């Protein structure tokens, strides 16, 4: 089940974040996201026990959705949870009459790049040394019809 993120999900989100990234977002960063208002910000995937096992954070900027963070708990990966989160946000973006979804991903994150490409995202550019020196970002875009 996919639902909007709320403060009760935060503990699980932080635990997944720490297991997923070398430089995890802080609890303050997530809290700031949760307190700023606006449609279509962030969603969480709940398992059968209603526990968060994946999430997607992003924001609307003008006519597009900027996807800033997506992760799935390690034991739940390769079950299409990230694909479902992406598809959910694509449908919501369409309903909100947005025309595209934009994101950056580390050039060496092949799992995430395959996920996006399988979902129809196209690489549109490279940001040199975007993360740290020597770590480029690939910019991806999905046009919404
Ligand atoms: C990237 C991530 C979100 C994918 O989540 P997921 O729920 O496992 O992804 P899905 O099951 O929806 O995978 C869809 C497709 O993506 C590709 N993919 C996903 N994980 C992959 C992996 N480890 N290796 C190769 N391809 C992979 C596959 O093509 C997969 O389809 P398939 O399983 O039929 O082959 C997850 O691995 C993760 O949380 N990684 C750490 C955080 C991260 O890097 N986030 C992205 C930041 S931009």
Image (spheres, grey):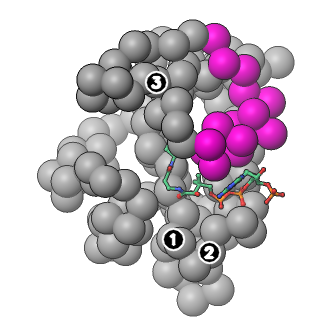
Up the image or down, 93 lies above or below 141; here it is below
Q: Which residue is mark 1?
A: 73
Image location of residue 144, percent across then percent down: 76, 21
Local SS, label 1: loop
Residues at discs 1 and 2 in contact (Cβ within 8 Å): yes
N-term mark: 1 or 3? 1
Residue name at image x 65 percent, y 55 percent = 82
* Mark 1 C-beta closer than 8 Å to ligand 1: yes
Image location of residue 103, percent across then percent down: 52, 27
Image location of residue 93, percent across then percent down: 65, 30
- From the viewer's side, name the closer residue of 44 and 131: 131
Does the magenta segment cover residue 96?
no
Decide if residue 13 is in sight here. Answer: no
Left or right of 24 in this view: 145: right
Q: Which residue is mark 2?
A: 76
| Image quadrant occupied by the N terminus | bottom right
> Looking at this rendering, what residue extends furthest in the front direction?
134
Residue name at image x 74 percent, y 69 percent = 79
- Magenta-colored span: 110-124
Decide if residue 143 is in sight here. Answer: yes
- From the viewer's side, name the closer residue of 6 and 70: 70
Q: Which residue is mark 3?
A: 137
> Looking at this rendering, what residue extends furthest in the bottom direction?
49
- From the viewer's side, name the closer residue of 134 and 109: 134
Up the image or down, 77 lies above or below 118; here it is below
Up the image or down, 91 lies above or below 81; here it is above
């Amino acid at each position: 089940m996919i639902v909007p993120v709320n403060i009760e999900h935060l503990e699980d989100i932080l635990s997944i974040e720490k297991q997923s990234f070398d430089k995890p977002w802080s609890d303050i960063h997530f809290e700031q996201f949760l307190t700023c208002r606006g449609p279509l910000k962030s969603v969480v995937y709940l398992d059968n026990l209603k526990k968060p096992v994946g999430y997607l954070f992003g924001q609307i900027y003008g006519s597009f959705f900027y996807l800033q963070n997506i992760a799935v708990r390690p034991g739940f990966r390769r079950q299409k949870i990230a694909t479902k989160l992406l598809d959910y946000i694509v449908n919501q973006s369409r309903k909100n009459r947005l025309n595209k979804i934009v994101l950056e991903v580390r050039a060496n994150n092949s799992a995430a790049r395959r996920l996006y490409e399988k979902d129809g995202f196209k690489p549109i550019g490279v940001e040199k040394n975007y993360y740290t020196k020597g770590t480029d970002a690939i910019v991806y875009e999905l046009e919404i019809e």
